[in-house]
Image (cartoon, rainbow, N blue to C red):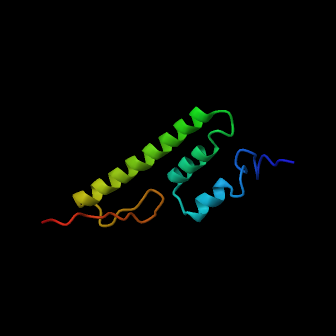
Amino acid sequence: MTDPIHHPPHYAFSSIEVIDAIEAWELSFHLGNVVKYVARASRKGRTLEDLQKARWYLARAMMNLDQDIARIEAGTEAEGTMPEDKPLRVKRKKKR
């Protein structure tokens, strides 16, 4: 018997549910959605649509990161944060 709310078949297709991996890896909202859509892409009959959604969330995460890095490099933020309040770690190149 399938449970469409707690264990839908397109999420529970292996011994590890996608939500458990996302939480264990402490992924942000955007990156969690990337993993979710990629993992289930072939499970619902809308592979291309799910991959396009994953690409949209990845592009959004990258855009936010680029903006945070630009603010830090411009000196307009003392310490950058990801949109989900996770610390942003930026490696700076040493000036010669």
Using residue 73 as the reference point, say whether residue 58 is left or right of it.
right
Q: Position of residue 33 (x, y in %)?
A: 56, 49
Residue at image location 70% in from the left, 49% down from the top: 11
Residue at image location 75% in from the left, 47% down from the top: 8
Residue ranking furthest to the front: 14
2 lies above or below 85: above
- Comparing 2 with 82, the one in front is 2
Q: For residue 96, what is the image quadrant?
A: bottom left
Q: For residue 16, what is the image quadrant?
A: bottom right
Q: Position of residue 66 (x, y in %)?
A: 34, 51
- Comparing 13 with 68, the one in front is 13
User: How many marks can you see?
Assistant: 0
Q: Position of residue 9 (x, y in %)?
A: 75, 46
Residue at image location 65% in from the left, 56% down from the top: 19
Residue ranking furthest to the left: 96
Using residue 17 as the reference point, say whether residue 49 is left or right of it.
left
Residue at image location 55% in from the left, 63% down from the top: 25
